[in-house]
Image: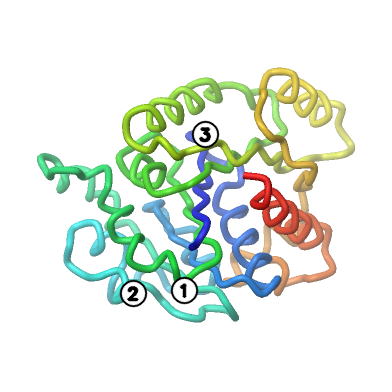
């Protein structure tokens, strides 16, 4: 049975899509069969994995509105062991179209249930808001992975995210747990990055991954080539970091 991890933080620009793309790819490189679900209307995970987001027959939008099955929407073997459920800007209209639909919080869950046994890991990239799309991801997931950027306002909004997760757990998905926190965009040259890490560690009682994702030029370049970092530049600091994170996620699964 697949382990389902939602990558969520309502702040934008913290490395959600980067983490979704590269964690999924590094898990696949470890021989795990992985599905990546792009729940963000920006479609960055879709394009970052080399798919033309505006030229897909079916996307998550069609799935949520019941216009296509999950098997019709999944793009198979985008990379070895890695399938993608793509997204594009159409998805931004889904919230309005789902008004009045019963059990709309569970649409993704009910569809993913059909395929989850085909995968070792399902990684869901959430939009940078606590919207119905994010709620769908949280009702589907076993755990939430929270990327936190090493910058001054890192803690801002974090309590709201944790509150939302606890509400979803209480009312919609009693199985939901916080997978852990991963620090992103770490700049070893600044005291601020180190200070942010220490502040968050003091504030949170959650699992904090030992792997810290550095600021890395190659990591920033990779999405424009439609490649995950472990394929674009396997020797870069970014690739090494995401490989280490994938190994930690696998090890953490044995404890959860």
The C terminus sits in image quarter? top right
* Residue underneath mark 1: 51
Q: Residues within 10 Å of mark 3 (few under 14, many from 20)?
A: many
The residue located at (57%, 41%) in the rendering is 13
Left or right relative to 239: residue 2 = left
Residue 246, image quadrant: bottom right
Please tell me which residue lies in front, 38 or 140: 140
Residue that lies at the very extreme toward the left in this rendered image = 100
According to the image, label 3 marks what residue? 11
* Residue 162 on image: x %, y %: 51, 26
Q: Is 240 rendered above or below residue 94? A: below
- Say few, some or many: other residues with alpha carbon within 10 Å of mark 1 (under 14 / 14 to 19 / 20 or more): many
Question: Earlier along the polypeptide chain: callout 1 or callout 3?
Answer: 3
Element class at badge 1: loop
Q: CA distance from mark 2 to mark 3?
A: 28 Å
According to the picture, the residue beneath numbered tag 2 turns out to be 56
Q: Nearer the viewer, residue 210 or 22?
A: 210
* Near-viewer residue (60 or 42): 60
Q: Residues within 10 Å of mark 2 (few under 14, many from 20)?
A: few
Q: Residue 78 at what x, y percent from top left?
A: 51, 78
> Is residue 176 left or right of 152 when viewed as pictured?
left
| Mark 2, secondary structure of its residue | loop
- Figure check: 109 above or below 200: below
Q: CA distance from mark 2 to mark 1?
A: 8 Å
Give the mark nearest the N terminus, 2 or 3: 3
Question: Residue sitting at 41 percent across and 32 percent down?
Answer: 169
Residue at figure coordinates x 48%, y 46% from the top left: 142
């Amino acid at each position: 049975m697949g382990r389902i991890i939602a990558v969520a933080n309502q702040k934008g620009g913290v490395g959600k899509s980067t983490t979704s793309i590269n964690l999924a790819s590094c898990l696949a490189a470890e021989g795990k069969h992985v599905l990546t679900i792009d729940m963000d209307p920006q479609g960055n995970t879709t394009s970052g994995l080399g798919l033309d987001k505006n030229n897909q027959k079916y996307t998550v939008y069609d799935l949520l509105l019941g216009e296509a099955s999950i098997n019709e929407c999944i793009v198979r073997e985008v990379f070895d062991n890695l399938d993608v459920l793509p997204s594009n800007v159409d998805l931004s209209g889904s919230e309005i179209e789902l008004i009045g639909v019963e059990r709309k919080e569970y649409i993704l869950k009910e569809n993913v249930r059909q395929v989850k046994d085909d995968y070792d890991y399902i990684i869901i990239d959430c939009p940078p808001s606590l919207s119905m799309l994010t709620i769908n991801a949280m009702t589907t997931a076993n755990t939430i992975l929270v990327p936190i950027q090493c910058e001054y306002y890192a803690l801002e909004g974090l309590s709201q995210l944790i509150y939302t997760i606890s509400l979803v757990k209480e009312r919609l998905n009693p199985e939901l747990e916080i997978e852990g926190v991963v620090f992103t965009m770490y700049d070893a040259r600044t005291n601020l990055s180190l200070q942010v890490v220490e502040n968050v560690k003091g504030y949170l009682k959650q699992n904090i991954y030992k792997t810290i994702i550095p600021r890395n030029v190659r990591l920033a370049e990779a999405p424009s080539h439609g490649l995950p970092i472990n394929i674009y530049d396997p020797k870069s600091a970014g690739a090494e970091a995401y490989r280490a994170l994938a190994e930690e996620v696998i090890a953490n699964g044995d404890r959860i």
